Image (cartoon, grey):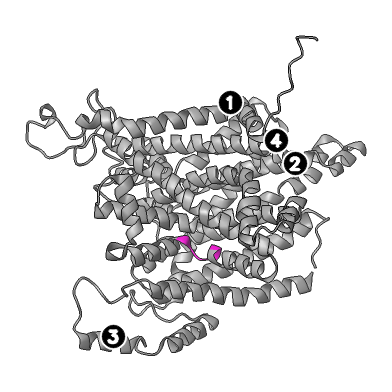
């Protein structure tokens, strides 16, 4: 078990470096750069800029420097936000995204699991059809439509919640609901499918044969196996949620990381883009590792080698 | 001889699947709804052409410049910021939104199926390297790839065949239209990864069966075995997954348009119309509601159809 974790942790380093390398190549392939605009710069000035940012060196030196920075986890200064380091920017904007992301995930889990379990237990009943139709609706309404509709109803129609910005708990309600809708829908569908499959398996029949009451069978035996698909979905979903979701940040004017990332790509702010990509890829891989470890607790039949 | 004996009719896999699909009421609802929307989007603009733009009697007499009118008998969905009939815009936008769904999915099908089938069939180290590459691309934010593809191949650098395609399908050599077609391909090129995994898994389980050995014994080339014998056998899961790719690329296109990276005026898609509507949500809510709900209805139907197809084509994994 320990060697499994160690091995997986070690693999993260080369994987992250490869992801960063691919990203770097992608950024360099794209024409244009951070200093060019509509107006053509005089060649002397362009040369000076290149010299200042080390762009006059051969590509392998630039690449080496970039990798060196990534390994030290110090990505240097942003090219667009003068005098601010990439790490500073990431840590400044992460808390906003992380707060709404985590809350949205908790909300999605509560609703998704509840509806999924109800649908599975009362299969082919009105409850089942109702929850699955609701889940399908969650998958089908784009969040940039859902968000403004919620604002229209709850912020501009009845004045329950503020329509945007950061501050009090009330500010969090609408963005968290908007963000969680699609995840709740996914989780409900995964839970239903997982539970239905598990309910037919042998160990549930054994549990029933032992004379356990239905509640114990469901909550102690079936649920653990049934939510394995949900757990697999958790890793990538949580990473995506923590990194921020651009649409919700834009609709509700929240200064999260997602918007910063999009802007950095559009601005050709290479250090910032690379920093966020490296941060995200490490996050995804760590979450996936945690998910893989938790399988063992959920299903004792799973072994690590 | 007893005349009541009827010869036993063999049923094919596809006929069976079709029957099961027709029994699923939600899937039938999705299919009917989609057909309806597609017909409207294809033929609607031909009929409704005249409603585009405002008519003289609706121009405000006091000379103010607000052109957004609420839904009325003349403009069923109201008008947009520039005074264009929103119903006509939604139908026009639907053409591009549906084309995104179809063309991007075809691109992702072609790339994903061939990549997955080749990796799965060749196996060993090649398979390992090919699938690690897929893992790696998964970890790069797709939006970065789309932006790079659009900027590398945009403007003057658009490949000639994309221009040709946009002229053939779109009917004009418009520069903007060929950029939209470029977007279709870029979206297809970022959504083939899961398809490749699905196909690889299928091929892995098929490649050691007798019919592959028989093909090899009769001297069929590797290429022939992969594309003539293996790929047709993966069709079930591929079709199921493709119907789920369609709504997902449509959502991605809408998201990109919302960010201002996708379809731009004078062209429209449901995503770009909804994005325009978001700006005026407080004063002219219909500008968001109609395109947004049309898109939601389409995605709703597609998802139901996709679920129904999965149950119909793949009875074993059917979730009861």
Do marks 1 and 3 share a chain?
no
- Foreground tag (1 vs 3): 1
Counting from the top left corner in percent of width and height, residue B126 is at: 64, 69
Along the polypeptide, which appears first: circle 4 or circle 3? 3
Residue A216 lies in the magenta-colored region: no
Q: Give residue A49's mark.
A: 3
The CA distance from mark 4 to mark 3 is 63 Å
Q: Are discs 1 and 2 both within one chain? A: no
First in residue order: circle 2 vs circle 3: 3
Assign a secondary structure to mark 1. helix
Q: Nearer the viewer, residue A107 or B163?
A: B163
Asked if residue A73 is positioned above or below residue B194 in the image, the reply reads below
Nearer-N-terminus badge (2/4)? 4
Find numbered disc 4 in the image and state the secondary structure of the residue it sits on: helix
Picture coordinates of residue B112, whole percent (x, y): 55, 56
Question: Which residue is at a point 63% across and 53% down the rendered structure image?
Answer: B199
Which residue is under mark 1? B25
Image quarter in which the C terminus of chain B is found? top right
Q: Position of residue B293 (x, y in %)?
A: 40, 35
Q: Say how many tags the image has.
A: 4
Q: CA distance from mark 1 to mark 4?
A: 19 Å
In the image, is residue B139 part of the stretch drawn in magenta?
A: yes
What is the magenta range? B138-142
Q: On the picture, is B215 further left or further right than A273?
A: right
Residue at 57% across, 52% down: A105
Image x and y of residue A240, in percent:
53, 58
Residue at the limit of the structure toward the left, as seen here: B62
């Amino acid at each position: 078990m320990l060697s499994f974790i160690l091995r997986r942790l070690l693999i993260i380093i080369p994987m992250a470096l490869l992801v960063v390398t691919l990203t770097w190549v992608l950024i360099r392939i794209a024409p244009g750069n951070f200093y060019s605009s509509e107006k053509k710069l005089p060649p002397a000035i362009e040369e000076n800029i290149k010299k200042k940012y080390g762009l006059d060196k051969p590509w392998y030196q630039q690449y080496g420097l970039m990798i060196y920075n990534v390994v030290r986890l110090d990505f240097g200064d942003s090219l667009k936000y003068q005098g601010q380091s990439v790490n500073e920017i990431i840590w400044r904007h992460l808390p906003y995204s992380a707060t709404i992301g985590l809350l949205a995930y908790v909300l999605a889990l509560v609703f998704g699991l509840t509806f999924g379990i109800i649908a599975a237990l009362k299969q082919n009943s009105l409850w089942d059809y109702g929850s699955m139709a609701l889940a399908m609706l969650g998958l089908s309404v784009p969040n940039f439509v859902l968000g403004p509709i919620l604002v229209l109803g709850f912020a501009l129609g009845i004045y329950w919640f503020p329509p945007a910005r950061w501050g009090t708990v009330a500010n969090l309600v609408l963005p968290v609901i908007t963000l969680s809708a699609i995840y709740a829908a996914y989780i409900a569908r995964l839970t239903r499918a997982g539970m239905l499959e598990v309910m037919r398996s042998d160990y549930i029949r054994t549990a029933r044969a032992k004379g356990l009451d239905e509640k114990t069978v469901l909550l102690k035996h079936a649920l653990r196996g049934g939510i394995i698909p949900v757990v697999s979905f958790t890793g990538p979903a949580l990473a995506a949620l923590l990194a921020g979701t651009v649409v919700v940040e834009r609709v509700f004017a929240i200064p999260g990381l997602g918007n910063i990332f999009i802007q950095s790509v559009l601005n050709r702010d290479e250090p910032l883009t690379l920093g966020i990509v490296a941060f995200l890829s490490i996050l995804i891989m760590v979450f996936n590792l945690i998910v893989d470890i938790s399988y063992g607790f959920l299903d004792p039949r799973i072994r690590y080698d | 001889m007893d005349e009541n004996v009827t010869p036993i009719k063999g049923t094919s896999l596809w006929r069976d699947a079709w029957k099961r699909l027709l029994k699923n009421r939600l899937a039938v609802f999705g299919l009917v709804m989609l057909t309806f929307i597609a017909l409207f989007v294809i033929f609607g603009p031909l009929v409704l052409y005249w409603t585009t733009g405002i008519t003289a009697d609706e121009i405000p007499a006091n000379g103010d410049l607000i052109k957004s009118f609420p839904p009325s008998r003349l403009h069923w969905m109201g008008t947009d910021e520039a005074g264009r009939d929103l119903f006509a815009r939604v139908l026009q936008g639907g053409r591009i939104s549906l084309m995104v769904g179809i063309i991007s999915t075809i691109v992702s099908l072609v790339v994903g199926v061939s990549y997955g089938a080749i990796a799965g069939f060749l196996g060993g180290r090649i398979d390992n390297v090919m699938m690690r590459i897929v893992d790696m691309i998964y970890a790069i934010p797709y939006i970065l790839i789309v932006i790079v593809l659009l900027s590398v191949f945009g403007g003057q650098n658009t490949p000639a065949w994309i221009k040709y395609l946009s002229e053939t399908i779109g009917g004009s050599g418009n520069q903007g239209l060929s950029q939209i077609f470029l977007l279709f391909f870029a979206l297809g090129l970022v959504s083939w990864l899961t398809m490749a995994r699905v196909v690889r898994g299928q091929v892995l389980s098929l490649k050691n069966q007798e019919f592959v050995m028989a093909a090899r014994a009769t001297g069929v080339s590797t290429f022939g075995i992969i594309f003539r014998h293996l790929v047709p056998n993966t069709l079930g899961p591929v079709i199921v997954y493709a119907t789920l790719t369609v709504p997902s690329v449509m959502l991605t296109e809408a998201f990109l348009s919302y960010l201002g990276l996708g379809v731009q005026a004078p062209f429209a898609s449901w995503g770009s119309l909804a994005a325009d509507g978001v700006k005026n949500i407080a004063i002219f809510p219909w500008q968001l509601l109609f395109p947004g709900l049309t898109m939601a209805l389409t995605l709703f139907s597609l998802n139901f159809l996709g679920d129904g197809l999965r149950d119909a084509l793949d009875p074993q994994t059917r979730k009861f």
